[in-house]
Amino acid sequence: MSSAASGPDPAVMEAIHRGNAVVFLDLVLGSDDGGAAELGRVKLELFVKDVPKTCENFRQFCTGEYVSPTNGQPMGYKGSTFHRVMKNFMIQGGDFLNHDGTGKTSIYGGSGGFEDESLDHYAGGHNVPGLLSMANSGPNTNGCQFFITCAKADWLDGKHVIFGKVLDADSMLTVRKCEAVPVVGQNNKPRIPIRIVQCGEL
């Protein structure tokens, strides 16, 4: 995190000057009973100019701005987990409803999900580690779940909306720490919870 002494983070400022937004996820490994170990912060540049609707959905779930229409409580990623980790592929999170990959909601309402805003705006597709992309259950079913690539995954091109990227090397190191967590079962659930303890916009 930047301090008053060190000044603004140049990478964050460059992203903002490009017309994009930058959000962060602070991650720990372990439960909240005092035994959690800090993993680090993941800063993510959101491609606001290319896919504004998808980015705004993610941004509001990071900041806690979105309020549930049913109970008036903020809804978002704080307190949720990365429920699926696949080494040399990706880490997946965002299901703050069921915490297992079955939950879906968005700031736009409805249970079916919102449309694929653009499937081909990002040159090269899912060609490198560190891309932020929407998880879905088919065309036009975007909700709250997302994944971050850990390797090239070009078979996802044309099927998932890329809407951001890991901003810097320190953030990617945190992603790699998550990728290394042992998993259990056919759903590749981390053996020890990977939790988002704080998140927001920079």
Image (cartoon, grey):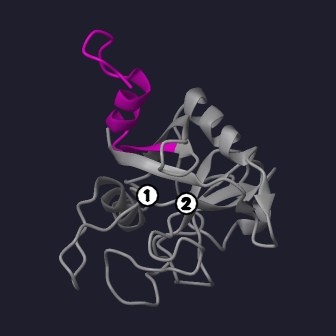
Gap between marks 1 and 2 measured at Cα: 7 Å
Q: Residue flagged by tag 2: what amino acid is it?
A: His
Image position, residue 61 (x, y; %): 35, 62
Camera-nearest residue between 74 and 125:
74
Image position, residue 114 (x, y; %): 43, 81
**Against 174, is 60 above or below?**
below
Question: In the image as oriented, which residue stretches furthest toward the top?
Answer: 5
- Give yes or no for residue 2 being in the magenta stretch: yes
Q: Residue flagged by tag 1: what amino acid is it?
A: Asp
Disc 2 on helix, strand or loop? Answer: loop
Q: Quadrant of residue 18?
A: top left
Chain part drawn in magenta: 1-27
What residue is at 73 percent from the left and 50 percent from the top? 127
**Residue 27 in the figure: left or right of residue 174:** left
Residue indicated by mark 2 = 121
- Give yes or no for residue 131 being in the magenta stretch: no
Label disc, if present, on residue 50 of the rendered structure: 1
Question: In the image as oriented, which residue stretches furthest toward the left?
Answer: 72
| Label pair 1/2, CB-CB below 8 angstroms | yes
Q: Quadrant of residue 76?
A: bottom left
Label disc, if present, on residue 160 of the rendered structure: none
